[in-house]
């Protein structure tokens, strides 16, 4: 995005500079050429003035006078001077001797007819292009001779190139400035857009309270304001829904408990031979399942609510305690349960988060481990926090099921025992604590359930 903006602005500036500078440089080239010719012509007429005396009444003094002036002129100018008489014979030249006949030069021929000539042509003697000016030397109506000035085109071209080069240097500076401005502008814009997309990502990851800074007043800030309004609404709706799930589960608990008590009482009052007893017992089991489901939903609604603060706690002592609590049940099943870990391992968690995670993991393990099996709870402090693992030697889960197991209501077994909410609650609690959960194959042969709590 940033580089595209820079490319557009630089491309546009290049186009504007090309449209402006190419015809301008052509125009400057033409002007430089014309100015030069005009200057040469004016110089030629001045020299023609100096030549009149020599051509009219040749004398050594007059010749000396002209030579001195021509030599002086040649010192300050790169032009070659040639003065010829009526017959085209050179009587004075800035760089060579006199005596040569120049009538074969077309411009001299034209000047001797009384007409000034100027232009560019190949030099016969030098073999390179040159610019020439030839003017007649007059005394009244009489033409006494001609003055010709020649100048190497390459020198004029070099001057023109200098002018054009400075024109393009200015263009290059404009182009670099445009690129710099475009880069700064694009950086400012992309920075603000990136902030917006970071916030969107945080919301997508579940941090519904994330908002973007919308102070400023530009279009992007307007977008940020709209984004914040949308986030506010989404957060409100999600929280309302969570509250509803929590409230509904909570409200269901009381009548369910009452119903359970009435059923217990009904069984007590019934004749044990009554064939209806079996039906009532089955209904009581269904009721137990319903109660577990409601408890699970309530736990999930509580774990999901984001406004829980994390507190530091000693994961080791909690884990040791939970293992001790589960030991009687494990003993009853003929399963060995162990705790491995340091005396203290501090990490952050939402209140009761660690207990619920361990209870769910151990409950699941005891559910699948056969008699004579093992469950090992390990606490390992790491650089970033504390890792809890619960290993068992049960049947384990396939890699695909290990991912799906954290989904709500997903169950691997088809029995009536669970609600499929245990691992979903674990996942919600650990992410509310800023940690991470996963399942893996255990070295014991079954499943390893892991949770990492931040320091
Ligand atoms: N240690 C384990 N070994 C093998 N499978 C497991 C283990 N732990 C969980 N699972 C599988 O993952 C599924 C989901 O577990 P989860 O705890 O979410 O639900 P549940 O135990 O069935 O019900 P609940 O915990 O709500 O009473 C389980 O039904 C089981 O199939
Ligand atoms: Mg479970």
Image (cartoon, helix red, strand yellow):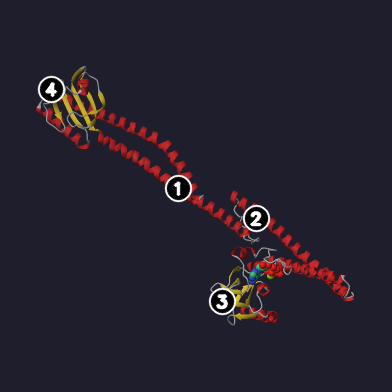
Q: Is residue 413 above or below residue 75?
A: below
**Mark 4 or 2 closer to N-term?**
4
The residue beneath circle 3 is 381
Q: Quadrant of ligand 2?
A: bottom right
Would residue 202 be found to the left or right of residue 25 on screen? Answer: right
Would residue 415 be found to the left or right of residue 14 on screen? Answer: right
The residue beneath circle 2 is 228
Would residue 44 be found to the left or right of residue 193 on screen? Answer: left
The residue beneath circle 1 is 179
**Mark 1 or 3 closer to N-term?**
1
Q: Nearer the viewer, residue 380 or 407?
A: 407
Q: Find residue 77 and report its horizontal and vertical position in percent.
A: 22, 35
Q: Label 3: how many residues lie within 10 Å, few (<14), some (14-19) or many (20+)?
A: many
Q: Is residue 414 visible?
A: yes
Q: Is residue 188 above or below residue 135?
A: below
* Number of the front mark, 4 or 2: 2
**Mark 4 or 3 closer to N-term?**
4
Q: How many marks?
A: 4
Q: Secondary structure at mark 3?
A: strand
Q: Find residue 102 and report its horizontal and vertical position in percent.
A: 16, 24
Whole-angstrom CA distance, mark 4 to mark 1, is 70 Å
Whole-angstrom CA distance, mark 4 to mark 2, is 102 Å
Whole-angstrom CA distance, mark 1 to mark 3, is 52 Å
Q: Residue at x 39, y 44 (%)?
A: 172
Say whether mark 2 is within 8 Å of ligand 1.
no
Q: Label 4: how many residues lie within 10 Å, few (<14), some (14-19) or many (20+)?
A: few
**Mark 2 or 1 closer to N-term?**
1
Q: Residue at x 82, y 68 (%)?
A: 283
Name, please, the residue furthest toward the left. 60
Q: Label 2: how many residues lie within 10 Å, few (<14), some (14-19) or many (20+)?
A: many
Q: Find residue 209 and report its horizontal and vertical position in percent.
A: 65, 61
């Amino acid at each position: 995005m940033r580089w595209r903006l820079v490319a557009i602005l630089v491309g546009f500036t290049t186009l504007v500079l090309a449209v402006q500078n190419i015809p301008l440089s052509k125009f400057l080239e033409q002007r430089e050429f014309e100015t030069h010719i005009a200057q040469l012509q004016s110089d030629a007429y001045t020299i023609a003035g100096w030549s009149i005396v020599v051509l009219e009444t040749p004398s050594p003094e007059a010749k000396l006078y002209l030579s001195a002036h021509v030599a002086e002129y040649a010192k300050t100018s790169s032009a070659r001077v040639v003065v010829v008489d009526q017959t085209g014979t050179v009587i004075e030249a800035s760089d060579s001797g006199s005596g040569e006949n120049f009538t074969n030069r077309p411009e001299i021929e034209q000047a001797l007819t009384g007409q000034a000539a100027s232009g560019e042509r190949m030099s016969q003697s030098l073999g390179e292009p040159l610019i020439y000016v030839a003017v007649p030397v007059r005394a009244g109506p009489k033409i006494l001779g001609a003055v010709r000035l020649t100048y190497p085109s390459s020198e004029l071209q070099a001057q023109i190139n200098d002018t054009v080069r400075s024109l393009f240097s200015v263009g290059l500076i404009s182009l670099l400035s445009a690129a710099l401005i475009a880069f700064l502008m694009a950086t400012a814009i992309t920075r603000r857009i990136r902030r917006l997309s970071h916030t969107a990502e945080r919301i997508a990851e579940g941090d519904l309270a994330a908002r973007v800074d919308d102070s400023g007043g530009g279009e992007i800030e307007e977008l940020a304001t709209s984004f914040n309004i949308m986030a506010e609404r989404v957060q409100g709706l999600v929280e309302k829904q969570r509250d509803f799930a929590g409230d509904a589960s909570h409200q269901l608990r009381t009548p369910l408990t009452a119903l359970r008590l009435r059923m217990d009482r009904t069984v007590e009052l019934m004749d044990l031979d009554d064939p209806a007893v079996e039906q009532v017992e089955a209904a009581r089991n269904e009721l137990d399942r319903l109660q577990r489901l409601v408890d699970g939903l309530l736990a999930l609604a509580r774990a999901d609510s984001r406004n829980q603060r994390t507190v530091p706690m000693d994961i080791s002592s909690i884990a040791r305690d939970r293992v001790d609590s589960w030991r009687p049940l494990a003993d009853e099943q003929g399963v060995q349960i162990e705790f491995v870990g340091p005396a203290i391992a501090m990490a952050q968690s939402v209140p009761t988060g660690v207990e619920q995670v361990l209870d769910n993991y151990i409950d699941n393990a005891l559910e699948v481990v056969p008699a004579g099996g093992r469950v090992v709870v390990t606490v390992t402090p790491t650089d970033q926090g504390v890792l809890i693992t619960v290993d068992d030697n049960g049947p384990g889960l396939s890699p695909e099921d290990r991912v799906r197991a954290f989904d709500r209501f997903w169950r691997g077994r088809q029995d009536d025992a669970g609600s499929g909410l245990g691992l979903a609650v674990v996942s919600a609690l650990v992410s509310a604590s800023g940690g991470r959960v996963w399942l893996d194959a255990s070295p014991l042969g079954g499943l390893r359930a892991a949770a990492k709590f931040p320091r």
